[in-house]
Image: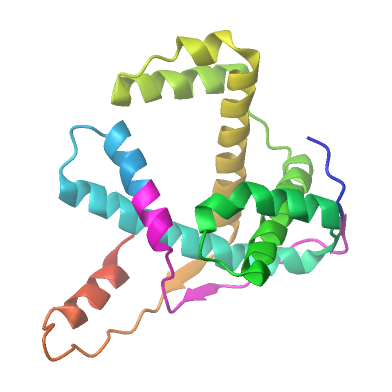
Amino acid sequence: MEFKSKIKRIKDPDTSKELVISNLYADKQMIEAHRQRLVNIFKNDTPQQIDQKISNIVIRDNVFNAAMNEIVKSYEINYDEEEISNAIVKIKPQFADASDEKLKNIAQKLIAKALIFRDLADTWSITVSDQEVKESLQKFYMFSNEPIKPYLDDPIKFANVRNVLLEEKIATVILQKFKHRLDIKPTNPAPNNPDATKTATDKNKIN
């Protein structure tokens, strides 16, 4: 995909900074989307196991977002307004209650991420082979029992899977390059919620 928005790396990303995560942020709609996806893939998991996977995803997302906040400082990005408008049209159904300003902010972040990932893939020589795509589809079949032949036979679907795997691989490399720690303070329990402190503390223990 060609972008009208342009990016320029002005310095190498500084990965020496330790990321300290003091709060966890998660969108309720995204959590539910993760839940539905995980339930479909891990059909034999208990609700508790699904919850654990979701908690791990939330923490990983927060660490990744903190890392991206550092990496984006290494780039200058010139956004194309038409590209932003097109992105807003695509994401608006997912964020029906979002303001125009928030939608524009989300669209810009998505475009920036795509451009930065493309540059990092080239810089760090990150690729996904045909064999990796096939192995990933085979694992998906083992977990979900869903047919994978349509993905193997359709070049476009096969390429889409490759792109997803490439994004995952780039994100994993980014997370590996940054040291991080959780520093989530327990909250005071509400009068009718004696487990509030326990919940906050438990989140701090998840790896």
Q: Is residue 83 above or below residue 192?
A: above
Q: Quadrant of residue 103?
A: bottom right
- On the rendered image, what quadrant is the C terminus found in? bottom left
Residue 23 in percent (x, y) is at: 42, 77
Residue 140 in percent (x, y) is at: 39, 25
Left or right side of 129 for 45: left
From where the camera sits, is residue 15 visible? no
Relative depth, front residue between 130 and 54: 54
Picture residue at 54% right of the left edge, 47% below the top: 172
Relative depth, front residue between 55 and 178: 55
Q: Is residue 58 above or below residue 188?
A: above
From where the camera sits, is residue 35 visible? yes
Left or right side of 87 for 178: left
Q: Is residue 45 above or below residue 95?
A: above
Picture residue at 51% right of the left edge, 52% below the top: 94
Q: Quadrant of residue 118?
A: top right
